[in-house]
Image (spheres, rainbow, N blue to C red):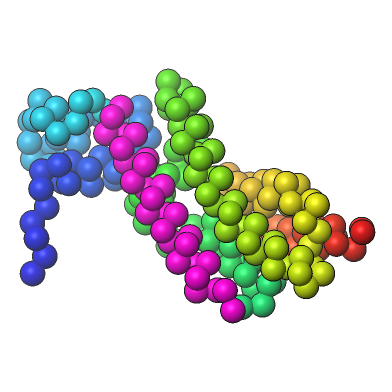
Amino acid sequence: MSAELTTSERIKLAALTMFAESGYEGASLSEIAKAVGIKTPSIYAHYKSKEQLFLQLIQEMIVEEHNQFIELLHDMVQAPIKEQVHRLFTFFTDLTHLTTGQAFLKKTMLVPPRHLREQLNQDLLRYEYELNKGIISVLEKGASQGLFNLEETERLIATFYVCVDGILVENQIYGKELLEKRKQMVWQSLWQIWTMTARED
């Protein structure tokens, strides 16, 4: 039998859902408190402010997604390089099975609260640095097989993020069928760009 959630944990779960659905500005502490079944002032016994609650959730969701990323790297280590790159691409663009935490993190990346933008940018850049280690490990294996040019690592990584971030934006605009079609075209273009750098040597 699972242990009953603490009030602090229930506050975080309710806040996570509301932030994911409505963003920082659209979620109020009174609504979060109502969802938990407590009065608004009771939240302050656990969190100093909505801002602190929001930032703590961001940190926890970064850790959660990064752990999933590390697990992916371990699971695909024996796969062909093209499959590894495709699985990296899919990890960031398969939006059909997002957890509430992942949806919250991606929405915040796209539209951060204005007054928290600078701090969030620093947090997300640190997270990107950690992700880059995994991407570079795949690039290095591919380079050893003559697929990629490591001298172009910075450009290849920049291209990767432009592609996956573009899919995130298009997810807000297009229906499932068109989005999937565009995703396949973007993947093909990404692979061509990555392998083209080796052919240019």
Residue 14 can be seen in this image? no
Vertical position of residue 132 compared to residue 188: above or below: above
> Which residue is at a point 38% across and 50% down the rendered structure image?
63
**Residue 169 painted magenta:** no
- Count of all numbered marks drawn on residues in the image: 0
Locate the N terminus and report the quarter of the image it occupies: bottom left
Horizontally, residue 51 falls left or right of residue 97, namely: left
Locate the C terminus and report the quarter of the image it occupies: bottom right
Give how far across and how far down residue 115 sits, in percent. Answer: 42, 20
Residue closest to the far top:
115
Give how far across and how far down residue 51 sits, in percent. Answer: 30, 27
Horizontally, residue 72 falls left or right of residue 154, namely: left
Give how far across and how far down residue 156 sits, in percent. Answer: 73, 52
Which stretch is magenta?
Answer: 51-78
> Which residue is at a point 53% across and 61% down the rendered structure image?
91
Residue 57 can be seen in this image? yes
Vertical position of residue 44 compared to residue 135: above or below: above
Majority secondary structure of magenta residues:
helix
**Residue 77 painted magenta:** yes
Vertical position of residue 89 compared to residue 42: above or below: below
Q: Out of 32 and 42, give the one closest to the viewer.
A: 42
> Which residue is at a point 50% across and 70% down the rendered structure image?
74
